[in-house]
Amino acid sequence: MAETAGSATTPPVRNNWLEGPFAPVDQEVTVYDLEVTGSIPDDLDGRLLRMGPNPVDPENPVTYNWFTGNGMVHGVRIRDGRAEWYRNRFVRDDQVVRSRGLDPLPGPEQLGGGARYVADNVVNTHIFPHAGKTWAFAEAGVLPIELSYELECLARSDFGGSLNGSWTGHPHRDPVSGELHGMTYYHGWEHVSYQVLDTTGTVRRTVDVPVHGRPVVHDCALTERYAIFLDGPVAYSDELLRQGYAFPFMWGFEYPTRWVLVPRDGVPGDVVSVEVDRWAVFHILGAYDLPDGRVALIGPSNSRMFVTDRTGPGEVPGSLNLYLIDPVTRKTEVKILDDQPQEMPRLDDRLVGSKFRYGYFSGRDQGVSTLIKHDLDRSAKERYAYGPGRFGMEAVFVPRTPDSAEDDGWLMTYVTDMSTRTTDVVILHAQDLQAGPVATIHIPYRVPIGFHGNWIPDAELEEQRKGLGL
């Protein structure tokens, strides 16, 4: 019906996390023999994989939150200086299965305690190699999903029945033992669970830590002595759930925010809680023990989140903070290292739990997407700008050789170009960002901005399988 003069229309509700570089893609594709500009380093032999939300059906833009979209995995296979293929695949949760008319995934129907896995089992957060397999991970009560080498979904898993009811979207690997450590939560729990997944793919240790409410615990940190998580200030809200919000968590102004230090080899009674100013820290660059008994922890931080905007992070500009956590005085000293907003921190994974010097971040500089490198010992930083209309994602550090020094290696990331609706995989030498990419792999499709991923060398998977006698 045509509008009459003077009639008003209601403008459509907008949600930035469903538009532009975040907008979902509809199709699964496979492309072989990708075009390359420059020269891919000969020592790179494996897959650069990443994961992110890609809602399969139209969502209510009022209640949709970026954290809750169906998962999609993206991957580029590199060997002998060539980019052999690019693939993207939906992670087959229950909603994807219904929408696409697919067969349900095999695997357990129940978590520890007899409860069925969380509605639709949306897995959208991270990809890890472990126990000779490739895994898609998420948190808050969903089951991990095993992937094939070519990124097809194989099965849900509860790690052979050893999972206690929830896993994490952001584990960290101990570089000495090869085990994965994570903090797990679920809105029905009144605790956070520290879990250690051994190299066979079995949870060998669980420590349940009581908390004041039902906080989001996306990330954690390891030192030689402790596993650490932030209790608060973003916590579960029954009221938001009743209102239909996909991510029913909000800023708790009265929540007693604290760092919780769980001794890695202690007993539950040894857990220490340390007061801290109210900061939201969704991602942690790293942490390490100091000689005086304190812990140094560095991470992008927000002074407020999910107060007025329930669709995604970024309500107020963030900063990069250093937290000096004292388990004796139970106090935390906070220092702002950089007031430029930045996120998705990565370091050299060989240094998880130890003193590190360098960190790599995604940021914006006057509206331009940038890769930021911090030299924390010198309080210095460098930037590499991807260019107008181009949006970089989390950059993964890959050592040039197994025994090369920290920062001597490659930074690899996906960069979405909104002017061409294509994507590049950019490979830079971490010690010479200003020289630009040593190689750029061209993908003729757009990869939406997502969450996390890893470079998975074929040799790493083979070593894990060999260790299991496979």
Image: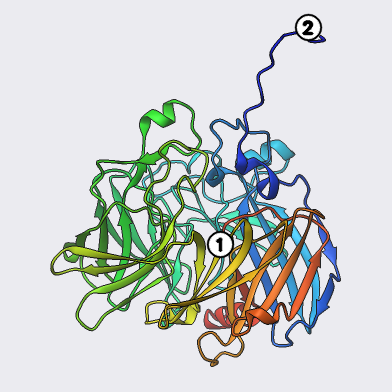
Amino acid type, mark 2: Thr
Q: Residue at the left extreme?
A: 329
Would you say 218 lies left or right of 134 here? left
Q: Quadrant of the C terminus?
A: bottom right
The relative height of residue 131 versus residue 302 in the rendered view (above or below) is below
Looking at the image, which residue is at 68% across and 65% down? 414
Q: Position of residue 409 (x, y in %)?
A: 60, 85
Q: Quadrant of the N terminus?
A: top right
Instruction: Please state which of residues 119 and 182 is positioned toward the viewer in this rendering.
Output: 182
The number of callouts visible is: 2
Quickly name the residue at label 1: 363
Residue 4: mark in rendering: 2
Would you say 249 lies left or right of 133 here? left
Circle 1 — which element? strand
Would you say 171 lies left or right of 89 here? left
Instruction: Please state which of residues 424 and 139 is positioned toward the viewer in this rendering.
Output: 424
The relative height of residue 213 versus residue 175 in the rendered view (above or below) is above
Q: Quadrant of residue 94?
A: top right
Q: Position of residue 317 (x, y in %)?
A: 46, 52
Q: Quadrant of residue 261?
A: bottom left
Pointers 1 and 2 in contact (CB under 8 A)? no
What is the distance, in whole Å, between disc 1 and disc 2 at their CAs? 47 Å
Circle 2 — which element? loop
Looking at the image, which residue is at 48% across and 72% down? 200
Instruction: Please state which of residues 347 and 200 is positioned toward the viewer in this rendering.
Output: 347
State which tag comes first along the sequence, 1 or 2: 2
Looking at the image, which residue is at 74% across and 72% down? 77
> Could one spot residue 470 in this view of the protein?
no
Identify the colour scheme used. rainbow
Q: Position of residue 164 (x, y in %)?
A: 38, 54
Question: Circle 2: is it few (<14), some (14-19), or many (20+) Cα within 10 Å?
Answer: few
